[in-house]
Amino acid sequence: MSAAAIPPEVRMRPRLALRGITKAYPGVVANDRIDLDVLPGEIHAVLGENGAGKSTLMKIIYGVVKPDAGTMQWEGQAVRIASPAQARRLGLGMVFQHFSLFETLTVAENIALALDAAEAGSGLPAKIRDVSRRYGLTLDPARLVHAMSVGERQRVEIVRCLLQAPRVLIMDEPTSVLTPQAVLRLFDTLRRLADEGCSILYISHKLDEIRALCHRATVLRAGRVTGECDPRRETAAALARMMIGAELPHPRHRPPVAGAPALVVDGLDLRPDDPFGTTLRSVSLTLRAGEIVGIAGVSGNGQRELLAALSGERRVARRNAVVLCGTAAGRLGAAQRRSLGLAFVPEERLGRGAVPEMSLADNALLTARHRGLVSHGLIRADAARSRAAEIIASWNVKTAGPEAAARSLSGGNLQKFIVGREILQGPRVLIAAQPTWGVDVGASAQIRQALIDLRDAGVAVLVVSEELEELIETCDRLAVIAQGRLSPARPVAETNAEEIGLLMAGSAATPERTAAARRP
Amino acid sequence: MRIALEARREASRAAILLAPLLATLATLVAGFVVFEALGKDPVAAFHAFFIRPLATRYGVGELLLKASPLMLIATGLAVGYRANVWNIGAEGQLTLGAIAGGGLALAAGDAQVPSALLLPAMIVAGALCGMAWAAIPAWLRTRFNANEILTSLMLVYVANLFLSWLIHGPWRDPDGYNFPQSKLFTDAALLPNLVSGTRLNAGLLIALAVVAIEWLFIRRSVWGFEMRVAGLAPAAAAYAGISSKRNVWLGMLAGGACAGIAGVNEAAGPIGQLLPTMSPGYGFAAIIVAFVGRLHPVGIVFASLLMSLLYLGGESAQVNLALPSAVTGLFQGTLLFFLLAADVLVNYRLRAVRARPAAR
């Protein structure tokens, strides 16, 4: 980087400085001699793929994890942060990717739990209203959390941090649960905070967001710093090269040749098992052979319930609510639906898609028990082992072999194994939930390409994902799920992120809708 | 410096084998302390407990005799335990098996039914009645989602009171001087002896055969595989379409059948009649045996021998050292306690941690 590219604020004293931070876990070095400077009032991106070590680094800064080596300076003074409480006292705030709110308590009660007794008194609701007004974070202190959308819950977390007047605010993948419109509102809030002098550490792997928001970026790859730059002056391709060490691959696409309906959902109503689950309301969907339909939506809007009803893990009272390959399948269990030609890649890999303690050979058997691996009720162990070996070879799964336990694989490799296992069964309908969540860019591209190849071979594919870009890239038609209702599926070419975002926000989230409508 | 537990990336095979040995050793150490506290010479106590019972051929026979029902019941229970189906009521299922088999033997009476017909019929009847008793908690669980731990345990007391009523009432031996006991079985209704000079009978062969079947079931059968999946990862079992109801039924019925057969073996073996109490708690001790044996057939064989030795040792210690009979129960409990503690080492390892690793 040339000297001219260095912005003037670099010459300021850093508010937070890390030197040589190293942290190793058994079998992996999560952080390898990392240096990082955070200046007052800057929005500093920490960019990297899943597993690059971003979250570990933030946990070290916030006192959750202790580093093996390295030093930390706060306002020029050497510090050792032993606990999140100490980090908060210094002036560090963190908004986690997964929120830690009690669903049965109100906003004010949740916030009071994180404060000292003196601050959590009767004046708190007024303070909450004050802060939320100042930063444009609409919030009613008396509301119960379980009735709130994910975006609103994130506001609670942010307000909770802001009440402590932090000087460094850490945001861990804050936009992964937000609609495109809510993302813009969040950015407004963060910019206002930065203008007031608060430093923001912004963790993400989304290049466009970082280019739009951040002043400076530190790029991590495999636990090391591989670059530092001004993201506003870099192209997305250049950032991607720094992040993954290669060009971003793009899948090939052919025009769809949709055939007969393979999966038809007709007016499905379903109450959830879980008291905080989402009720499905007259969900209808037709999935044809030879097309990929995507279901977009912020998680927690009924995806889990819909997928369980489609896979057969949850049976439906009305037989005709789910028709699979011409058979009314509402009351059939998961095994019976599989024998009709259904395959399913679930969101949770360990514990649902695979048994962690069992070998890959046993896990190959898991969903293929009625496909040639069993005769007369006895397992053909050799066949299961060679099936596993076949999946490992054709998907380039990095593992010791078919006898390795599923939990010894990395997330991306296990996902390739599960996707491979399901595809190898020759399904007529494949359902994939969050197929590339937490998977590195190379494996993601491989999985997306496989879904497209499957479609070209005449299989009906349904993808449920929170990653809008992924859906737009792979799908032929797109529907949106919000509060248990599914919008009609529209061809991807005839829609755009803005429109889908409005649908994702749902009818109840009117403030977001009007806010978005006012923007150009 | 302090000691910290660190998760292993894969379960340690060495620790799987070592944990039971470690637990046994710790139990012995605890026993040493207990004997010392009771004012007994620990060496003499250990000799009475662990050496004297095995010093004779008769003693070894007794060891195998008592190990047979433990092995049989634990093997049956392990089928369900592997799938998180917790049948705690084997003692009651044993009692029902004894009632069924014994009832058949008493009904045959002096009618000269050949042994080759009567004994198999008794065993089948015992297995069926044990299964029927276990079917009650299985049905309550699958129909009403009632916790099988509670229902199966409560049925133990129902079964024991039912046997007690039979022995004090309709089945009491009219020539028995009003003692609560049934008539003695005829020879045709008794299990053949295996080794002369001992009480060891064919019940051991039945137990070993069941162990072999179980080994095949878990290693090779797809149902055994499905039950293992259900125990390790219930969500994966639901995802793969494995029927949790079938697992409950299989687990409960396997435990009930084995306990029922064990009940017949007790009645038609060492006891030879029906008494108000048919077992010194085999149904409960088998739970410990199943876990000490890591729910594995071969492990269960060894664990049943160990538990049997604890029974014999307890009796021997009562006779020779005037120790209370509760010592047997104390040893069993201590062993299970240490075993569960040692289990931590299978998935974790101990690591010495220096106080401030971040300092350098």
Image (cartoon, rainbow, N blue to C red):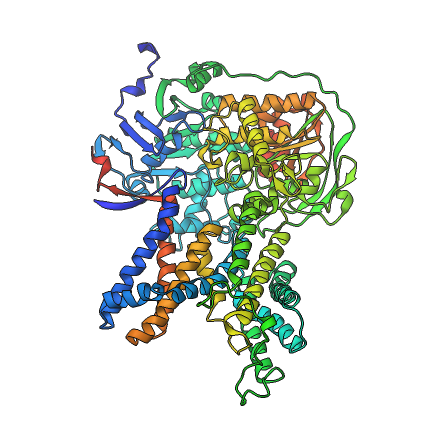
Which of the image's four quarters has the C terminus of chain B? top left
Q: How many marks?
A: 0
Query: Which residue occupies 31% across, 10% down?
Result: A3
Q: Quadrant of residue B6?
A: top left
The x and y percentages for residue A28 are: 36, 30
Query: Which residue occupies 71% across, 34% down?
Result: A341
Q: Quadrant of residue B31?
A: bottom left
Which of the image's four quarters has the N terminus of chain B? top left
Q: As drawn, is A124 to the left or to the right of B112? A: left
Q: As drawn, is A92 to the left or to the right of A250? A: left
Q: Quadrant of residue A394?
A: top right
Is residue A435 something one can see in this rendering? no
Q: Does A349 appear above or below B111?
A: above
The x and y percentages for residue B245 are: 63, 54
Question: B263 or A283, which lies in front?
Answer: B263
The x and y percentages for residue B103 are: 63, 74
The x and y percentages for residue B196 are: 46, 66
Q: As drawn, is A235 to the left or to the right of A432? A: left
Query: Which residue occupies 38% across, 48% down?
Result: A114
Q: As drawn, is A364 to the left or to the right of A53? A: right
Question: A325 or B114, which lies in front?
Answer: B114
Q: Residue furthest front?
A: B196
Question: B157 or B143, which lies in front?
Answer: B157
Is residue B182 something one can see in this rendering? yes
